[in-house]
Image (tube, coloured by chain):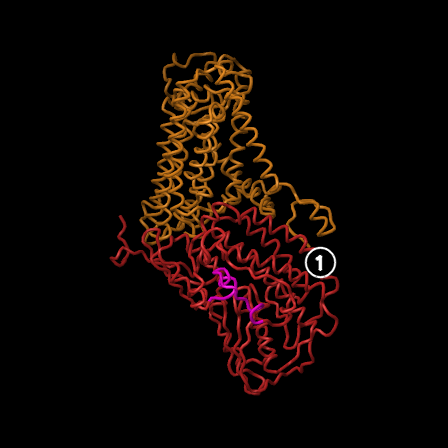
Chain colours: A red, B orange
Amino acid sequence: MLEPKAQPADGVLRINMGPQHPATHGVISFMVETDGEIMRKATPDVGFLHRGVEKMAEITSYPGFMPYTDRVDYLASMFANHGYAMAVERLLALEVPRKAQYLRVIADELNRIASHLVATGTMAMDLGAFTPFTHWIRERESINDFMELICGARLTYNYLRVGGVCADWPVGLTEKILLWLDHFEPIIDEFNRLITGNEIFINRLANVAVIPGAMAVDWALSGPNLRASGVPFDLRRCQPYSVYPELQFDLAVGTGSRGTVGDCYDRFWVRIVEMRESCRMLRQLLAGIPEGDFKAKVGRTIKVPAGEVYSAVESARGEIGYYLVADGTDRPVRVKIRTGSFTAVALVEPISRGLMLADLVAVIGSLDIVAPEIDR
Amino acid sequence: MKALADILVVQLLGQDPGSWPFTWVVYAAVMLVGGALAMTFVALFAGPVTVVERRVAGRMMSRIGPNRVGPQGVIQWLADGLKCFLKEDLIPDEADHPLFRLAPYLVFAGMFGTFVVLPFGAHLVAADLNVGVLYLFAISSIVVVGILAAGWSSNSKWGLFGAFRAAAQIISYEVPSALSVLTVVLFAGTLSLQGLIREQGGMPWDWFIFRTPFTFAAFFLFFTSALAEGNRTPFDLPEAESELVAGYHTEYSGMRFLFFLFAEWANLWIMSAVAVACFLGGWNIPGVSPATIDASQGLAFWSFQAISFAVFAAKTSVLVFVVIQLRWTLPRLRVDQLLEMCWKYLVPLSFACLLGVLVWAWAVTAGSAVDLAMRLIMTCLGVAALVAYARRVRFNYVADKDNYLKMTGKELWYPPYRLP
């Protein structure tokens, strides 16, 4: 028979889950130590997708860095655009036209829905239910079509400019989006009937990988993951930017409806609720797009006065923040990008102890980790 | 098969094969032909059912599914099979070569062996063993050996995980599935599958499932356990693609991989056919008793064979369809939940069903008023369950015409894949 390969004699089986594995959502690797089906430990091994985006910023002009920010998070690139544009505008002390603010937030919320569709869909797929995913992808396709009309791109938008957005609002798109919202909101109920209320699904997620609120704060978790742990923190509410102060919306906070506050099911449920809230915001925004310019008057070359700034927006994966140091030239001295997935992936190690191997995919899915956002 | 050979020779040639000098040669030839026919049947089921499954899945997922090879993709399965034939046969360097080669055959043999006792029609059965049910459970256990060998010999950690999960799962679930089939064995007093079918009748109230509440429950217990034994969703843990890459057949490719898939899809027929034979009246034609079929001659006899096969195939196909639907609806259980469900719920419940049938068979005489009333009640219950099920799944198959018209301004011609 087989000679077993050299394994330490402690009875622990070490498995490399990734970098090419169907459940790791991109190129991440997890060093999993298992005792049978029970995980002793799962250590994330990141860096496979490191592209040096921050370094690229230092050799690119301020407007020229905008397309690179798209690649920070390919599922929610509008937020990466937004955070960077806001950082530069703050240093420039630039007033962005009201219409541009509206268009930015509409694009943000559309992108948030698209991103949550993928997050919740792939989560169901990781747990073995394939059908919900394809239904969500069908809906996301509509959003991609809208995005194509808005900015010409379906995935990496490059929509925002310093001082505004790249193009005016297309004629007739408002009606199309409103029509789609009428169609989409019942589809959320359909999705809930299909998978959210499924007994097997709930049993797989409830009480699994609980992150208590205090722990979530300690580990600098942000976004839906933090709110799922019962902490009502949302940059749109707590550090309002753009036109968010004028919008009516509720924060989706984990309530432990099926298990404990901060379990995988809460993280899933918070995203479903956030899609509804985004629809609500979109209706308000589309009803009141003001007249005016879509872009402030900004020269082709931007020279930013010396100084430093940190600006953050609420992305679909938590806070995406840009720490920008300028020295008065047309290039930044240093850009540091803070992303939600990077802090979330660090939490996998402490919360995965003692779970089953199959729970690891639920944990990865529920934290909504996107590999390029971890590594940048 | 021997019985069928006798009938064939007597009816077609008008002679008694027992009087021939080399009777065994005739029998052996008939056996070979029968084996080849059964194999053809399995291939002709397992191939096209993959296309059916993918089309059903496509419909449920609001996409199309394979529709390029042949009209509406009907011979996609031939293309897939041919592709697997032409692939390089890879065996990992550090795999246990003999075992690695052997494993697919074990899985296939275990699967194909069940067709010895599985009936297709009134007289269409390879061998009507008097220990048919016992044989069925024994031979299908060989599949576990094959899966375990595949996972172990691959020398892959994912394969090993899949193999151990399979061993734990299939062996556990054999207990409730055997126990729930025992309920109908108690009723009929025979282990022969043909005997079980003959005890039932053509009409739903003659079927074992509607005889008592206990057999009704036992049917669902059996169906659930059969799903788990066949590694079908929600119990497809041994090959859980999002956890274990591909489970026990991670390292397999080409023809050997095809053998696993082949066995898996053929197993769809097996589990459904056993459920139909044991609970749903088998091949019984409504209004025609098995004795009438036995007594018929010539064309009538062969027509009865064909009709009984059609009845059996229709019932089985319905169950196959349900299994396919379940696969594309439900998420997967976790391994501890899976075993908990087996040992904490299914095993005690199937024991309870067994005891219930014992008490029923002792207390109620067949044909008495209580018996007839219960059959009627259970049949009504069954029809109600069927209607509720149809209403629940109807949604998946009805195209959302109004919404499509609203969103696109166009009439719908085929499922709504894409909104504006």
Quadrant location of residue A159? bottom right
Identify residue for label 1.
A176
Q: Identify the magenta region.
A: A221-239
Can residue A77 be seen from the camera position used here? Answer: yes
| Residue B358 image point, x, y percent | 38, 23
Position of the C terminus of chain B by quadrant? bottom right
Callout 1: SS: helix
In this rendered view, identify the residue nearer to me: B78 or B286.
Answer: B286
Q: In this view, does B188 lie above or below A13?
A: above
| Left or right placement of residue B389 versus residue B264 in this view | right
In this rendered view, identify the residue nearer to me: B356 or A111.
Answer: B356
The question of residue B413 being in magenta is answered with no
The question of residue A223 being in magenta is answered with yes
Task: Tell me the crowding category of disc 1: few under 14, some 14 to 19, or many 20 or more residues within 10 angstroms, Cα based.
Answer: some
In this rendered view, identify the residue nearer to me: B216 or B108.
Answer: B216
In this rendered view, identify the residue nearer to me: B327 or B353.
Answer: B353
Position of the N terminus of chain B by quadrant? top left
| Residue A359 image point, x, y percent | 42, 53
- Residue drawn at point x = 59 percent, y = 60 percent: A114
Q: Is residue A324 above or below residue B353?
A: below
* Three-letter code, disc 1: Lys
| Residue A288 image point, x, y percent | 72, 66
In the image, farthest residue toward the left: A9
| Residue A354 image point, x, y percent | 35, 55
Q: Is residue A16 above or below residue A89?
A: above
